[in-house]
Amino acid sequence: METQYRASLHGAGYLLFELKQVMKLKMDGLSTNDIRKKVYEENIFQGSKKSSIQRALTSVIKRAEVIDQKLGKLLIEGSLETSKVINLYAIMKTDLLFYEFMNEVVSEKLHNNNFELEKKDINIFFTVKSEQSAQLANWSELTLTKLKSTYLLVLFESGILKERQGNELNRLIIDDYLKEHINHIGDSKYIHAMGG
């Protein structure tokens, strides 16, 4: 679990396709260095710019490291819904600020059957965090704007936000086996943060 706030999510994003590719290579027994090499040499991410592949790869490798064998298998072989939940779990596990956003804003709403995420909810969250963290207070307005937009995109791509430009939240359907496994490995707080 990350203990420091990072703004790297805005440069990375959701990356479900990329995570699946890296997870397959990891499950095949490739080392992190071999995975890096293969992704570049074979253009596995189908990316055009080396810098965007580099950014994505750094985030995806981090996510792959927090996914155990069972979750890795489910990510690759399970339904799209299941793999979306696993990716969301991995994002929260590797990004403390995003986890806190999910836990303090999204989960709070879902647990209270409030399905509207307003712009002010996101702004208030970042304002409060900036007051609590000198590190975050030093981030530029541009970085914060990009992060807010990325958070919404991640919510949309994971299925929590019904429409890309909308504000209506959706409760994720989390497979019982997946829920049990995540609870069993001591990560129930992430299920809670997803509104489960």
Image (cartoon, rainbow, N blue to C red):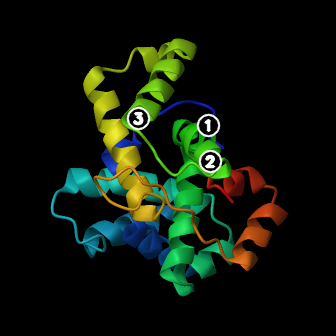
Q: Residue at x 42, y 68 (%)?
A: 16
User: Considering depth in this image, is 86 or 172 the residue closer to the camera?
Assistant: 172
Q: Residues within 10 Å of mark 2 (few under 14, many from 20)?
A: many
Mark 3 crowdedness (10 Å alpha carbons): few <14, some 14-19, many ≥20: some
Mark in front: 1 vs 3 = 1
Do the numbered discs 2 and 1 sit on residues whose CB atoms are within 8 Å? yes
Distance between mark 3 and mark 2 Cα atoms: 21 Å
Which residue is located at x 38 percent, y 72 percent?
17
Residue at 74 percent across and 78 percent down: it is 177
At mark 1, the secondary structure is: helix
Q: Position of residue 137 (x, y in %)?
A: 44, 15
Q: On the rendered structure, is 175 left or right of 138?
A: right
Query: Disc 2 versus disc 1: distance between alpha carbons?
Result: 6 Å
Which residue in the protein does label 2 denote? 107
Q: Position of residue 158 (x, y in %)?
A: 46, 63
Tag 2: amino acid? Ser
Q: Is residue 69 above or below residue 90?
A: below
Residues at marks 1 and 3, CA–CA distance in whole angstroms: 18 Å
Residue topped by disc 3:
7
Q: Quadrant of the N terminus?
A: top right
Q: Which mark is residue 104?
A: 1
